Amino acid sequence: MDNYLNGILVLVLVLNLLSLGTSRINTIIKAVSVQGALLGVIPFVVHQHLTLPAIIVAVMAIALKGVVIPLVMVHALREAQIKREIEPMIGLMPSIILGAVATAFSLLFASQLPLASEHVGKLLVPTAIATVFTGFIVLITRYKALTQVVGYLILENGIYIFGMLLIEAMPFIVELGVLLDLFVGIFVICIIANHINQAFSSMDTRRLVTLKE
């Protein structure tokens, strides 16, 4: 089962680099959608004897992260009628290199951690750290409000992978509450992004500084 798990986590890392290396917002949303669906499968691979609450959380994660939230973002994208991140703070190739360096650092750092014996040899911890880094990179280097929402979602995916280490110990209501908070947060942010687009004819968050004037 470890080979299947590591295979899924390698795909998650590849999707991180894809998110950093494309300017098409629709492609980034699709990458995060596939990543969310893959994360929902991980509990079934990591733990062979899942409790019913854990199975419900995993199914809800697939539905929300893989389907519902991406559909909300695609709807917001169509309303805004934009396709590309025009001027990222860092170019696409430097972003990929930065993501690759963060991934290499995560692998080295995780190899030095005193992990439990059942987690040694698995890529859960390095993938979680690398995904959090990727989310930060997208958040701070992209200007479009919708792209920053995707960065927040990638960051949350990294935290979700960390949670896989404690899925049996995590209370059901806590996991469910986090997923619902995530959905409500993304939904509200997409509404705000649409209002920004209507007010400034752009989703560029740099335009918000004009509110000070």
Image: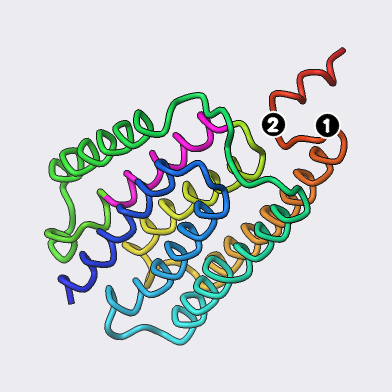
Instruction: List the residue tagged with mark 1.
Output: 200
Q: Is residue 27 magenta?
A: no
Q: Is residue 133 magenta?
A: yes
- What x and y, as percent, mark residue 34? 44, 65
Measured in 3D between alpha carbons, the distance from the residue under mark 2 to the one under mark 1, in whole angstroms, is 8 Å
Label 2 residue SS: loop
Q: Quadrant of the C terminus?
A: top right
Left or right of 100 in this view: 178: right
Start-end of magenta stretch: 127-142
Left or right of 132 in this view: 47: left
Main secondary-structure element of the magenta-colored stretch:
helix
Instruction: List the residue tagged with mark 2.
Output: 204
Question: Is disc 2 in contact with disc 1, using a CB cutoff of under 8 Å?
Answer: yes
- What x and y, as percent, mark residue 134? 40, 41
- What x and y, as percent, mark residue 135? 46, 42
Label 1 residue SS: helix
Residue type, numbered disc 1: Phe
The residue closer to the viewer here, 113 or 145, is 145
The residue closer to the viewer here, 203 or 105, is 203
Left or right of 210 in this view: 7: left
